[in-house]
Amino acid sequence: MMIKEIETLDEAKCFEIGRSCACANIRRAARVITQLYDGFLRPTSLRGTQFGLLMAVRALGPVTVTKLAEGTMMDRTTLGRNLGLLEKKELIRIQPGKDQRVREVSLTDQGLEALMKALPLWEKAQTHVVKGLGEERMNNLLKDLSAMVSLVRRV
């Protein structure tokens, strides 16, 4: 049975799946947009993902690792690895919370300074994207991505 299915999986079908697969297309877009923002942020030595995490910590902080994982929709292993890099750069502080089983993340003065230096570069990247897509398409894209997140979280 499986061999018969493979025989019908011709080149055209593979291209159609690649063209229409939500996962593959969103991941491809995520890779290229990440590269764009990383390029703009390069002078700060921050990557786009690090900038986003620092912004989340600034917005939510001090914040537990669990709440940060939920807010950024990152699995705890990936988040822990990323937080470790930021802590090593002394941009964040991770310490026990009131409950010793909980760890809290907060921005250091160096972290706030790094964000302030990176913000104008992030704004340039954001402006580049918004100008390229147009405000209406950008707003629609953000709404569509939000709808995708909501859809997936209901599964």
Image: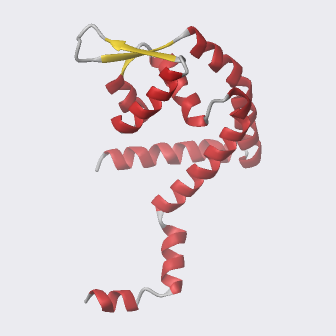
The quarter of the displayed image where residue 63 is located: top left
- Left or right side of 101 for 57: right
Say if 15 sits above or below 28 in the image: below
User: Does 12 appear above or below 17?
Assistant: below
Please provide percent x and percent y for residue 40: 73, 36
Of residue 101 and residue 72, the one placed in the foreground of this image is 101
Q: Which residue is drawn at 53% across and 23% down?
A: 54
Is residue 14 shown above or below 118?
below
Q: In this view, does 154 lie to the left or right of 83?
A: left
Which residue is at a point 32% across and 17% down the rendered structure image? 103
Residue 50: percent from the left, percent from the top?
Answer: 55, 31
Q: Quadrant of residue 44?
A: top right
The N terminus - image quarter: bottom left
Determine the residue positioned at 27% across, 17% down: 102
Q: Which of 153 and 102 is in front in this view?
A: 102
63 on left or right of 29: left
Q: Nearer the viewer, residue 27 or 43?
A: 43
